[in-house]
Amino acid sequence: MLLLLMACAGSPEGAASDTGAASVATPPALTASSEVTETTPATSTATSSGRPATATGDTGIDSADSAGDTGGQEVAVSCARGASPLIVTCTVELSEPEPATLELSSDGAPTRTFSAMAAERHELTGWGLKPLTTYRWSLAGHEGEVQTGPLPWELRDVDLSVSGTLFGMDALLVYVSCGWFLMVDGEGDIVWAEPTDVYDELPDGMAWSQADRSVLAVRDSTMSLDESVFSEIHVSGEEVLRLEPDVHFTRRLTHDVARWGPYTYLLGERDGIAGFEVWEGTTLIGDYGLEEDFGEVEGLSRDHANGITVTSAGEVVISLLAFDAVVAVDGDPRSPTFLQRTWHASGAPGGPADDLPEADYAPRSGEVFVGQHNASRHGDDLWVFDNFSDGFSRAVRLRMDHESGLLIDEESWSMLSICPNQGGAIPVEGGVLTTCANAREAKLFRHGEAEPAFALRAACPGAARLEGFTRAFPVQVE
């Protein structure tokens, strides 16, 4: 068990973390809530056609009804702080279908905007909001104010620090081992928080779906005494999908999960050999195992698959730590070559680890990644969190030369530490977001710069060395 703990891993999601989602899944329906548990009253007022609307400040609820300033529509609008103190839920009812846009603004805080397509009734969730802040809301010609609540008391002692300037995202999503998912903005404020019971003490298997505005979490069979489970939690706090062993999946889930469009990709093992299952909601679409392509390889059951991502075209990329290898499979259920291997790469051919035969991509000589995590492909670039080829762990961008089959080291960023249990290398606009789980640290680098532009550290009091966060993910609040 100790050996497993010292070499564990995970992976991001595509385009947003990047799953590279080419098709966008419809965000789940939201449930409005007017429950408020904090003691400071949220004073609120609303106006429509110059007339004040009914307001109940001690519950944080605004409501307004009017006609005339929205093109003759009969309109009913209400905004309230949700069950979570950092969530605002607004409802608008119209006499005719129309799109709706909710704007939340406050002095000293970024303005947040949330939109919905044409309908007669809208329920909009505002999130990514600072605690204990009064926001002005605007929706369907109505305006008012609502105050967010304080952070939950369980987070009062979280060790959280940031430095530098955030770019390429609005916030970072991390997990801290006292049982919470957190989003942290560039000023070090927690702007979203949700408790989870998916993990025991050692976290693993996590991703962010930007298209769905949801966290994907896996209870890892190698990191838990309990059975595997998959849970998807929307930013509203609603669990919108849960998959259970035997009832749904049959593999022992390990280390990672990914999302592309409506499809969920669960990394796992069967008879010790890695593969993945493809799900659309609660329907199994397909199942791939490495034995289908590498059945003759001795020791395949030691593959230690520790990461899964999906490209913008639906290609699944799997990291195999024990082979210093990356394997790609067509993951598009609509493709005639669905679940067929497309290529595989070796980071250290002829090195101490066994090789998968006949690699399609490899360095001309030496090593470009060893004991890697979080492999993902973006165009002709293969991104990898490389643990051991260069002294310190690093994020590395490798160019895939299709003509020669070479992996060419184009750019890398050192973590100045070793991160054997988990790491992340997620490209963002202008640079890369890296994670060293052992140090409970995320660093954001710009292209061409060796020093991070931004860094975040987060840990619960008394956290053990292995109780870091799995990986930091870039989040756009929209």
Image (spheres, rainbow, N blue to C red):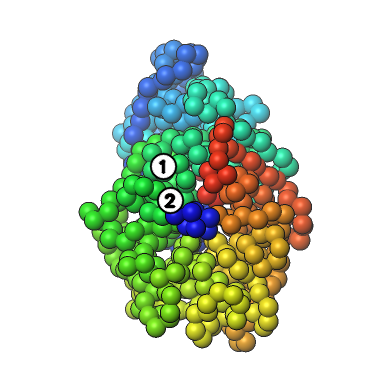
Picture residue at 77% right of the left edge, 57% below the top: 449
Residue 49 position, x and y percent, is 46, 21
Residue wearing tag 1: 200
Q: Is residue 177 above or below residue 37?
A: below
- Closest to the observer: 80 or 288? 288
- Mark 1 neighbour density, 10 Å: few (under 14) some (14–19) many (20 or more): some
Q: Using residue 451 as the reference point, say whether residue 385 is left or right of it.
A: left
Location of the N terminus (image quadrant): bottom left
As shown in the figure, which amino acid type bears the numbered disc 2? Met
Q: In the rendered image, is residue 77 in sight?
A: no
The disc, 1 or 2, on the residue closer to the chain's N-terminal end is 1
Residue 349 drawn at (x, y percent):
59, 80
- The answer to whether 106 appears left or right of 27 in the picture is right
For residue 252, what is the image quadrant?
A: bottom left
Placement of 345 over or under 439, stated as above or below? below
Circle 2 residues within 10 Å: few <14, some 14–19, many ≥20: many
Question: What residue do we see at 37% from left, 80% from top?
Answer: 295
Question: Label for residue 223?
Answer: 2
